[in-house]
Amino acid sequence: EAQVTQNPRYLITVTGKKLTVTCSQNMNHEYMSWYRQDPGLGLRQIYYSMNVEVTDKGDVPEGYKVSRKEKRNFPLILESPSPNQTSLYFCASSLGGGRVEDQPQHFGDGTRLSIL
Amino acid sequence: AQSVTQLDSHVSVSEGTPVLLRCNYSSSYSPSLFWYVQHPNKGLQLLLKYTSAATLVKGINGFEAEFKKSETSFHLTKPSAHMSDAAEYFCVVSDPGLGGYQKVTFGTGTKLQVIP
């Protein structure tokens, strides 16, 4: 089954304790992206990756890091989490190449992070 | 610049009556437009997309949307609401962006309530 898998689904942690949210897709997609969803704000893009070793900032990258060492994985790293990063996070992927803007994205089920 | 405005944060309809969820957009390019649906505790699922072909786009579950360039609108409709349609809906605009890479902007979402 084609899917985007995020782990963990839920996490409560404390300020300053480094954490990583993993994202893996099994569709051989080139394009992957991270979003955060906050009430009344919709989804905002944090980082995206056009392909392996190619990443770039989205609209709200501050406080986050990503890496893309393999095509299937795109982890999101919070080096020193703070309470304002409490949010619902989604990883997404699409085929990539060509007109990327035409391609729908496949989303994971989300990771709910609470930073105390 | 790219933006999306979903004109209603909440819409309430009775089961069996028509649904109209409104979306206006702006883009400096010829954009692609999408509607996604999000059920509680789930990721986003593609309903339909417009990519410069037919202006009336049919999607899953009986939804359709019409691209109107003169009005910069992409409203989502369904002739008859079903209880299972209760969810949050996101309008999304995607274009090549300044650097030729995909720029994606989500609307803030419309929560659809269906009354039995």
Image (tube, helix red, strand yellow):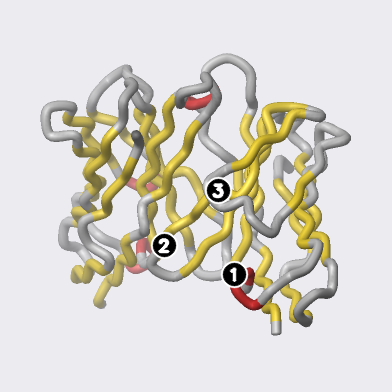
- Dot 3 and dot 2 within a common chain: yes
**Residue B62 placed where, x, y %?**
31, 45
Label 2 residue SS? loop
Image height of A32 relative to A11, above or below: above
Residue reaching furthest to the left? B70
Q: Name the residue under label 2.
A: A41
| Residue at (37% x, 38% y) in the render | B59
Which residue is at the front of the view, A85 or B38? Answer: A85
- Left or right: residue A86 versus residue A66 is left
**Residue B33 placed where, x, y %?**
36, 34
Q: Quote the CA–CA distance across marks 3 and 1.
A: 13 Å
Q: Mark 1 points at which residue?
A: A87
Residue flagged by tag 2: what amino acid is it? Leu
- Left or right: residue B50 versus residue A65 is left
**Quarter where residue A71 is shown:** top right
Residue flagged by tag 3: what amino acid is it? Gln
| Residue at (64% x, 61% y) in the render | A110
Q: Mark 1 lies on which chain?
A: A
Q: Mark 3 points at which residue?
A: A45
| Mark 1 or mark 2, earlier in chain | 2
